[in-house]
Amino acid sequence: MSNTVRTGPVRRRAALATASVLAVLSLAATACGPENSDPSTDAGATAAPTVAASASASGKPGLGLPTSLADLANWSLDDWAKFANDNILKNDVVKGFWDMTKMEAAAGRDTPEFSTQSATAQNETDPQLPSPIPAKPQAHPYNAATAVLGKLFLEDGKGGGGYCSATVVSDPANPGRSNLVYTASHCLHEGKGGKFFQKMTFVPSFNKSGAYSNGKKASEAEMAPYGWWAADEAYVSPQWAAEGGHDGGPVSQYDFGMIHVHNMNGDGKSLEETVGSSVPVWFNAPREQVNSAFAYGYPSAAPFDGRELEHCDSTVKPAKLSFEATRPTMYVIGCTMTPGSSGGGWFVTKDGKPALISVNSIGPKPAAWMAGPSLQAQAKNMFDYVSKKKR
């Protein structure tokens, strides 16, 4: 197949209306496509998926651009399915693409940069953003709680590649057998006017043993202890596909995304079974109950080298950041992680266990703090559709 894309996203500050549509890409390989794959999208197609309007089974005025965010929040699963069926792209088979050389050469994707000029809703933003919290490496070997973190590799369409960070999350429709991975939209799609990335492959618990630390050489099994997991579907927020750009702005308030993966080793085990755990997503978390947050990722820009799972531990209530008051207000914690950490999970304790409440989205340069989206109704609706979809 020739459906490839560039890593260099189309970058522009978002200034569009608050409503858009869920942008969905089904990246099914030709040998194992989901049962609702579009048969008209053949292996020779070159057109990129677009955010296109379509008729709604429930009679809503088009799934492309709902008239308000409330319309999108109230979509039924049939509405999501209709849009997904109209936006499918078959992906190149990725098995064998990510060899040791390409994996080592992959650089961390840039985090969209915060701009004070684009923070317009100051009534929703704390007057002072938090002080830096130095990131520190996770001790080796990673335990079950941190083994759910990993690197999400992607192909740039020019023979090279990059990566983000991502997390294995629990799937209510498949308890104990999740194949769902949560990350940021800007790790999956170029943004406004752009395309989805290709050959997206998740490597959970990258460098779990530490054999690859401190410049040492390591085997593929040591770098990827749980193997390679190819994305067969990818989902980004509707706002990112319509508005995404280089500057952190209103679109960052919806900078969440997810993929469904399959095991390229073909042993029948799910991602969760292979890794040994998953983390539930806490949607609509009451802000007054979020009194701390711990952000994880694999930063690659100095002073980091992309080999270590780093974390920023904030033991105080996250600050608030908003660019547009009608959108969910972002969380902010002090953090010095750099590019490559994008998409990494934010964890809190809920009922005595870790839960994911956000992902690394935007920050300033030089790195001092990190902001992540609050996962509200739209994020939950997207998650419910992906979880319940028949495959």
Image (tube, rainbow, N blue to C red):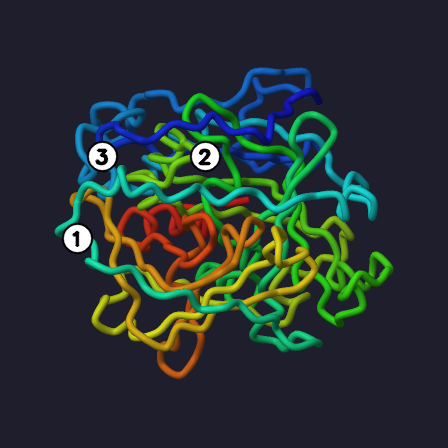
Q: Is residue 180 visible?
A: no
Instruction: Please state if 345 lies on the left or on the right of 82 as rendered.
Output: right
Q: Is residue 334 above or below residue 260?
A: below
What amino acid does circle 1 point to? Answer: Glu
Query: What residue sits right under mark 1 in the picture?
Result: 124
In the image, taking residue 135 as reference, residue 254 lies left or right, namely left
Q: Is residue 16 visible?
A: yes
- In this orientation, which residue lies closer to the viewer: 4 or 62? 4
Q: Which residue is located at x 68 percent, y 37 percent?
A: 161
**Regarding mark 1 in the picture, which secondary structure is present there?**
helix
Placement of the C terminus among the 4 image quadrants: top right
User: Residue shown at 36%/64% (left/top)?
Assistant: 333
- Check disc 2 and report the residue beneath it: 24
Q: Write the residue at 42% across / 49% down.
A: 361
Q: Mark 3 falls on what kind of element?
A: loop
Residue at which label 3 appears: 18
Q: Amino acid at mark 2?
A: Val
Q: How many marks?
A: 3
